[in-house]
Image (cartoon, rainbow, N blue to C red):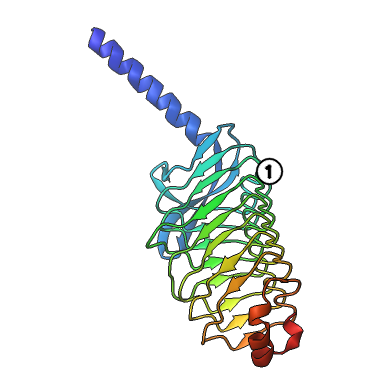
Amino acid sequence: MKRTFIFSLFFVISLNLYSQNMSDFEIQVVENFRGIPKGIFITKYVGNNVTVNIPSTINGIPVIGISSGAFSDEVFLKIIFPEGILAIYDYAFSYCTYLTEIIFPKSLGYIGQNAFEACIKLKEITFPEGSAIEVIFSGAFSGCIELEKIIIPNNSGFVLGVGAFLGCKNLKEVRLPGGLTHLYDRVFAYCENLESIYLPNSVTTIGESAFAYCKKLSVINLPTSLQNVGKRAFADCALLPPLRLEMERRFGIGIW
């Protein structure tokens, strides 16, 4: 009798926790998304946890994405994504000003426009080895002023959008993937503490103002693959004189 009571109590508690966790999310069921017959997008977070664990399934259906604005302006410190998340859409976590840590899954392929804009306490972004990440779209991490480190593993065809890390004032370490061909306009502009960056030998284009006002930038390589550098790409990069003659010879004085 006692064992039955304990089992019943455990079952009730477990059931309540499950219901509570699931009730933290509003959802939308989608069909035929990137080859998945049926999946769930989280459309709104209505919980109040300090750490948010995105469930891998809800009612037996896999959670595969986060909709636009779903967590925008919410108050939590950490978010953990399960394997199976494929896409995080525009403004999904923008202005989450207490967010300090993100654990991305290997499955994630797409981060939308301004998805993590102005997450001002976020310090590090790391994608696991073997990550499927293909696109970090325009402004995705712009205004993350405490961000110090970005590591993106190799992925052929990887795209880094306009202003993706614009205004990340404390950014110090960047590891870009081999396969990256374009650094679009303003991608690292106003990263005032960025001192060095290595460009993989796949980069063909550096866009307008890509590194403008990176005042401490003193070390950057020019890969042999590089063909085009946009106007004011290195505006106000006062510590790059050793490369200036080579850059002007190859790409013109307008890049300053």
Q: Nearer the viewer, residue 232 or 241?
A: 241
Residue at 42 percent of width and 41 percent of height? 59
Residue at 53 percent of width and 34 percent of height? 23
Is 61 located above or below residue 33 in the figure? Answer: above
Q: Nearer the viewer, residue 48 or 1?
A: 48
Mark 1 neighbour density, 10 Å: few (under 14) some (14–19) many (20 or more) = some
In the image: residue 14, left or right of residue 75: left
Q: Quarter holding the N terminus?
A: top left
Q: Residue 213: percent from the left, percent from the top?
A: 74, 67
Residue at 46 percent of width and 57 percent of height? 127
In the image: residue 188, left or right of residue 155: right
* The quarter of the displayed image where residue 154 is located: bottom left
Residue at which label 1 appears: 73
Q: Residue 63: percent from the left, percent from the top?
A: 45, 49
Q: Amino acid at mark 1?
A: Asp
Q: Residue placed farthest to the top in the image?
A: 1
Q: Quarter holding the C terminus?
A: bottom right
Residue at 44 percent of width and 42 percent of height? 55
* The quarter of the displayed image where residue 18 is located: top left
Q: Residue placed farthest to the front in the image?
A: 242
In the image: residue 114, left or right of residue 14: right
